[in-house]
Image: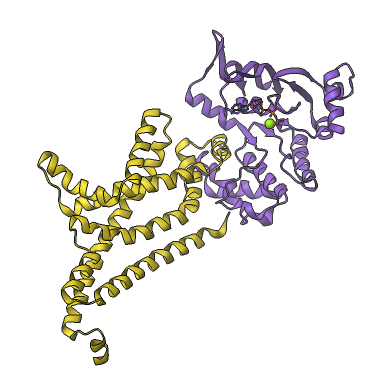
Amino acid sequence: MYLLEAKQVHKSFGENHVLKGVDLSVAEGQVVSIIGPSGSGKSTLLRCLTQLETADRGDISICGRVMTKEENGRAVYSDKNQLRSIMLDVGLVFQNFQLFPHWSVLRNLTDAQVRVLGRSREEAETIARDLLAKMKLSEKEDAYPCQLSGGQQQRVAIARALAMSPKILFFDEPTSALDPELIGEVLEIIRDLAKQHMTMVIVTHEMTFAREISDRVMFLEKGSVLAFDTPEAIFADASHGRIQAFLSLLHK
Amino acid sequence: MDFFFQLIRMTPDTFHNLMRQMAEGTWQALEIFIYTAIFSVPLGVLVALLRESPLKPVSAVTRFYQLVMRGTPLMLQLMFVMYGPYYMFGVSMNRFNACILAFVINYAAYFGEIFRAGINSIPRGQYEAGQVLGYTKQQTFFHIVLPQVMKRVLPPTGSEFLVLVKDTALANVIAQPQLFDVAKKTSGSMVSVVPLVIAAAIYLIMSAVVEMTFHRMERKLDYYS
Ligand SMILES: Nc1ncnc2c1ncn2[C@@H]1O[C@H](COP(=O)(O)OP(=O)(O)OP(=O)(O)O)[C@@H](O)[C@H]1O
Ligand SMILES: [Mg+2]
């Protein structure tokens, strides 16, 4: 079963046609990586899928619920309640963490559980502590985000997203804001999630990582899908001339 | 003690009488300060939100109001609110109410600008993080954005409150009794500088209390950056 189905998604900012009919299907338990040059529309695609932007055209369904359906050449969104329940099925991890600085690590993980999902404080804290243990951050529950390293902040941000029990988790360049020596600890967490068959869509510039954990890799260029295939095919196959050029540029 | 009364060239009775009037004036100045503070801060939040309204006319009208309030003398505004309605329509307002109204609409304009800057200084990502976690717009604003705004606007708000302590003296132009009025009248009738010195000391103490209060609040919010 597909947890995410997007068909012919279009998005323009004024005259700038950023997404030119993108298709993406993600099955339950799959990990999909999105790669491509800067400005190709990777973030915009993720933002359309997480409702941070509204698509101009196309169909998007998440967990079997219709988010938007194309009618007469434009995307028609479902009603507020439906969009909200879709929102609760997805999680998003930002490039620059976006933790709430005025709350402790624990509160960052519990507040939305209590306020949005209506869980009891005890239940929320149990879930939060469990996740912090998995992130190897148990001793940091009373710390404030500003007291943590970038890698630790990103792990808290991942835990915050997971605390809401999303069915599908999106990452927008989760390691791009990190010092090189901190990248590994965050990738390791994502790797663990993949082993537990968490459904994930990851925009990344970490090619070795993408190749290693993805079931499918999408190569996006200038708003069009150049290839959507297994990592072996994408990274090995010389038939994708543009992709090879992009990859060799990265290695320089 | 006798030396003290010789120094200020007053009998103990005149001095006590003076201090009684000073105390009353201080209370009247404090009333202006407190009412203005209570009403202008929430109104300032509203002004900030109206100014940021996506409806162009709303934002434009709010901006014009702020320009008028910040671009004309508060003294003139006090006169306008106090005497304007009488000159134009023959109705007059209670002096104290007119005074508070003028102060509130003036200070709300300044607070609006401070809060607007504060709200705009919160990165868009914070709103987006709230949104994808399922918080409603209101929850995101009141639980995530506003507490961070408060920390950032505390220093400029404190400055504004210091100005307000001294601005209460402007109520003199509409003959609203308060500390400055007492100081002026008594120093004139006694031909003495003493009332002025006492009033200055009282303003300074009130300012110091405001300064210390804000300093303490800032320290309380020092736990994060
Ligand atoms: N809010 C916006 N308003 C106007 N233009 C935008 C907006 N967001 C993105 N764009 C434009 O859309 C295009 C794609 O941007 P996007 O951020 O999706 O690229 P990206 O693939 O994520 O790039 P990067 O690898 O640098 O993150 C760019 O030309 C960008 O300028
Ligand atoms: Mg991007």
Query: What residue occupies the far front of the structure in this picture?
Result: B191
- Front residue of A38 and A173: A38
Vertical relation: A114 (above or below) A64:
below
Indicate the position of residue B18 as horizontal and vertical percent values.
Answer: 19, 76
In the image, what residue occupies the spot 41% across and 33% down?
B53
Indicate the position of residue A176 as horizontal and vertical percent values.
Answer: 73, 39
Indicate the position of residue B217 as horizontal and vertical percent values.
Answer: 46, 61
Examine the rendering and report whether any part of residue A19 can be seen. yes
User: Which quadrant would residue B34 be assigned to in this image?
Assistant: bottom left
Vertical relation: A76 (above or below) B26:
above
Q: Which chain is yellow?
A: B
- Front residue of A11 and A171: A11
In the image, what residue occupies the spot 33% across and 54% down?
B37
Total marks in image = 0
Q: Colour of chain A?
A: purple
Is B169 on the left-hand or right-hand side of B145? left
Query: What residue occupies the far top of the structure in this picture?
Result: A72
The quadrant where ligand 2 appears is top right
In the image, what residue occupies the spot 28% across and 71% down?
B199
- Front residue of B40 and A42: B40
Vertical relation: B70 (above or below) A48:
below
User: Which quadrant would residue A206 be assigned to in this image?
Assistant: top right
Indicate the position of residue A125 as horizontal and vertical percent values.
Answer: 59, 49
Image quadrant occupied by the C terminus of chain A: top right
Image quadrant occupied by the N terminus of chain A: top right
Is B94 on the left-hand or right-hand side of B222? left
Is B4 on the left-hand or right-hand side of A212? left
Examine the rendering and report whether any part of residue B43 can be seen. no
